[in-house]
Image (cartoon, rainbow, N blue to C red):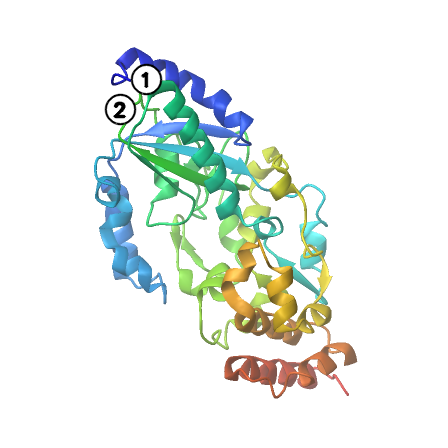
Amino acid sequence: MPAPTALDLEDLRRELPALAAQLGFNAIGVSGIDLAADEARLLEWLAAGRHGRMHYMERHGTLRSRPAELLPGTLRVISARMDYWPGDAADAETTLHSPSLGYVSRYALGRDYHKVLRGALQTLAGQIVERVGAFGYRVFSDSAPVLEKALARNARLGWIGKHTNLIARDGGSYFFLGEIYTDLPLPIDTPAEAHCGSCEACIPACPTGAIVAPWQLDARRCISYLTIELDGPIPEELRPLLGNRIYGCDDCQLVCPWNKFARSAAHPDLSRVRNGLDATSLSALFAWTAAEFDTRMQGSAIRRIGYERWLRNIAVALGNGPPVHEALAALEARADDPSGLVREHVSWARAQLLRRGASG
């Protein structure tokens, strides 16, 4: 098949939204690969140490902001958005204000998004091959050093809000992003304009003060970092601020006015809550064995943190909860856990409950 002409590529660009919609995507766009301004901000963030112990961020360096170095020959990036809010899940605010329940970030209640998006993007790439012939490409879904929010902004999918998440005028911020790096010189979109205005609701909403200024996030204080990325002890001074959040955090998004436009997930793998994790007793979750964790979390993004961190997070949440016998008994049952990390957090949590009046 001969190389696609400019007219072929314009036709393909016009067809992309319909193809993407059939695969469960809610929006799609195309950007160039110049991320110089974003690279400067990334390097400042790394120099300030705000990536914490995410050492891979430092190792990758500018690979994240230079698509053609990650995949030689890349000329364009196709960015796609897929909404994830599980419409049938228990009310997020109600769960957050029920300290005996565990709160899991709503993005992680369905199937592992890495697999869902990667599969859909791979199918989309195959459909493009059918239309223009073989071309160079690679699909990504939070699976490589990609500056996905900046690319999505440049592809007109939304703007980067003051909490550093991407926001779409027609869909809020409850969505995943995925990319296809390609050597096809497709027509590019105009970058999205920002519409946060004077609103800063997200900044005081952060339980740990991780949004240190508009558009500036210190990951070392972010609950998503502390419960997912951090592989060691959670700093003691931050533990009480985690409340009952055991995997990720949604607070900055829950207060964002633009999320009144958010839509429930349409993809069946994202719309269904798995294992009742939208509102489950902390004591019940803490009683899971390692085998139960592996079985229940099969196909879930949560599985990647492993059983040890899962128990660490729940121990902290139990320590922040009501000083009742059930919570204390759950903690005492793991006082001699094989993991030193778990034992440390159990000991801390038990001390919190005893200080507030729990009794065996």
The answer to whether residue 181 is left or right of residue 158 is left
Residue 118 shows in the view: yes
- Location of residue 139 with respect to 333 vertically, above or below: above
Residue located farthest toward the front when viewing the structure as drawn:
1
Q: Residues within 10 Å of mark 1 (few under 14, many from 20)?
A: some
Q: Amino acid at mark 1?
A: Leu
Q: Amino acid at mark 2?
A: Pro
Q: Which mark is residue 9?
A: 1
> Where does the image place residue 303, in percent across and percent down from the top left?
54, 61
Residue located farthest toward the top when viewing the structure as drawn:
7
> Where does the image place residue 302, in percent across and percent down from the top left?
55, 59
Q: Quadrant of residue 102?
A: bottom right
**Secondary structure beneath disc 2?**
loop
> Where does the image place residue 344, in percent across and percent down from the top left?
54, 83
Residue at 62 percent of width and 80 percent of height: 349
Sequence-first tag of 1 and 2 = 1
Q: Which mark is residue 185?
A: 2
Q: Which mark is residue 24?
A: none
Closest to the observer: 34 or 73?
73
Residue at 28 percent of width and 26 percent of height: 184
**Residue contact between numbered discs 1 and 2, judged by CB atoms under 8 Å:** yes
The answer to whether residue 51 is left or right of residue 94 is left
